[in-house]
Image (cartoon, helix red, strand yellow):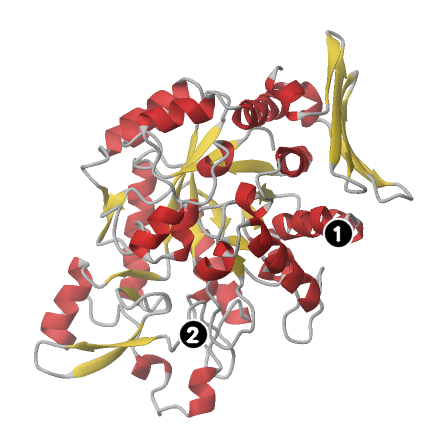
Amino acid sequence: MTGVDLLVYADRLGGDLPRLRALLDGPLRDFAGVHILPFFVPFDGADAGFDPIDHGTVDPRLGTWDDVRAIAANREVTADLIVNHVSSESAEFVDWLALGEESTHDGMFLTFDTVFPDGASEHDITAFYRPRPGLPFTAYRMADGRRRLVWTTFMPSQVDLDVANDRARAYLRRILATLRAGGVTTVRLDAVGYAVKTPGSDSFMTEETLEFVREIVGIAREEGLRVLVEVHAHYSQQLAIAPLVDLVYDFALAPLLLHSLGTGTSDRLAEWLRIRPENAITVLDTHDGIGIIDAGPSGDRPGLIDQDEMAAIFARAAEATHGHSTLASVIPAWMSLPHQINATFFSALGADAASYLLARAVQLWLPGRPQLYYVGLLGGLDDVALFDRTGQGRDVNRHVYTPEELDTALGSEVTRAQLALVRLRSTHAAFKGSFRYRVDANGDLALEWELGDERAALEVSFAPAPRFRLRLTGPDGGLTADSAAALAAL
C-alpha cells in the first residue's frame, strides 16, 4: 500500500472542514488520505464526538457533507462507524425512553435483561472486560416510571446498541450508506471488540465478536466501503481479525518501539516484524492513548513483552512526563496496569528528537499504510492545561491548535523532518516494490525496499544510543539523512 494518511479532528486542526481542506491542499498536500475523527452532531460531546446524537449529519459548526466530498475529491477519506453505541440524547434512545415497547426503536438498545434473561450472578457480571473502572450498566428511567439497566460500556451517556437486533442493524446500514454518499471511502469500526456480549466470557473479541465483524464487513462492502477495524487487544487478536477485513491497526508497533528505545534491544520488535499482518495501518500515536496492552500478555497467552516490561514502559513514560502520564492514564476494571499511556508520543520520549524520528522512520518504512496523528506530526507535547480543565486523560493528546501555534509547529525542525519522511514514503518508487529486513548480531535493524534500480534503506540502532540512517538511491541519484536537521533539509 502506498501513500500516507493523516489522523485529525477537524476542529482542532484548522477549526472546520473548509480550513482543514486548505491545509491538506497546502502544507499537508503529501498526505494521500485523511481520517477525519467524528464530525457528526455533536463533534464536541462528552467523548469528543464518539457519542453521536445524530451520526448521519455533519455538525454545521464544522461544515456540510459537501465539504467532506470536497476533501474526498483529491484524497481518500476515512470516517468512523461508531458501532457499539449512540448518545443517550439521540432521537432513537429518547423515543424509546418515552414510548418503551411501542417505540419503533424498541430492541435497538442493549439492556441487562437482553443479555441475562434469567438473571446473573456476581461472577457472571464481573467476568465482562471493561476499559473503564466500574460496571458497564447505567439505570435509565422510562416515561412510565420503570427503571431499566442499559449497557454503557464506556460512559453513562454512551448507550450500547444490541447489534443482534434488526433495528440496530438497520440503523448501522443507514449510517454506512450516508457515509458512502458523503465521499467516505473507508470506515473504521470503532469499539467493535466490545459490541457483542456473550455470557460466560469476558465478551471482548470472542468468536461471537468475530462473526459479527464478518457480518458488518459484508454490509459495509455492499455499500462500496473498505473496512478498518480498531481493536486494542492481545496481538493474536490482530492476527486473527486481519484476514477478515481490509485494514487492521498495527498497535503493537508503538509499545515495542518504546521497549526497544528504553532497553537498547530489538529482539521483541524483530519477532513482531516476522509475524505482523501487512494489511496494517501503522501508528505511533492516535487520538487515544499509546496502547501498551497490544504487545503484552493476556491471561495464559504470553505477550511480545511481559508484564514487568510493560510496567517498565509506563515507568519510563512517567519519568519523561514528570509523573503526569500516571495521573492521566486510566486503569480498567479488574486490571493492575493501564492499558494505554495517556501522553503524546513525543512527551513519552522526553521530547528527544533523535528517538522520536527513529520511531517515525521505522513506522514509515514498514509494509502497510502509515498514519500520522496531527499532534504527533506537529511535535506536540502534553496539553496539561486541557487535562486539568476536563479531567479526561486522553485530552493531553488532543490539543486545539490556534493558527499561530500551527504556523510555528509547521516551521519546526521535527515537523519538517516528519513531512520529509511522508514525502519520501509517498513518492519514492522503491516503496512500491519488495520489502525485506534483517537483524545483525548487535541487534541493529536494516529495513529495505527495492524496485528495479530504486532502493530505500533504513538502518536503525537502539544502543548505545538511538541512531538512524536512511539512504535512497535510483537512476536520478540518491540522498542520505541521519538526523533531524538532515531530514528537515530534504
Left or right: 1 as drawn, with respect to 333: right
- Say which quarter of the image contains residue 440: top right
- Residue 248 higher or lower than 329, as above or below: above
Residue 226 visible in rendering: yes
Q: Estimate the x, y position of residue 207 in percent, counting from the top left.
A: 55, 70
Residue at 81% from the left image edge and 41% from the top image edge: 464
Residue sitting at 36 percent across and 57 percent down?
Answer: 392
The kind of secondary structure element at disc 1 is helix
The numbered mark at residue 263 is 1
**Mark 2 element type:** loop
The image quadrant where one finds the N terminus is top right
Q: In the figure, 80 relative to 238: above or below?
A: above
Q: Position of residue 286 (x, y in %)?
A: 48, 45
Question: Which image quadrant is residue 108 in?
Answer: bottom left
The tally of labels here is 2
Classify 103 as above or below 224.
below
253 in relation to 211, above or below = above
Q: Amino acid at mark 1?
A: Thr
Q: Is residue 219 left or right of residue 146?
A: right
Between discs 1 and 2, the one toward the N terminus: 2
Q: Position of residue 38 (x, y in %)?
A: 33, 45
Crowdedness of circle 2 by 10 Å Cα count: few (<14), some, many (20+)? many
Q: Which mark is residue 197?
A: 2
Could you tell me residue 434's position as x and y percent? 75, 30
Relative placement, left or right, of 260 versus 42 is right
- Residue at image location 79% in from the left, 16% down from the top: 453
* Residue furthest left in the image: 144
Q: Residues within 10 Å of mark 1 (few under 14, many from 20)?
A: some
Tell me, for residue 441, which label it has, or none. none
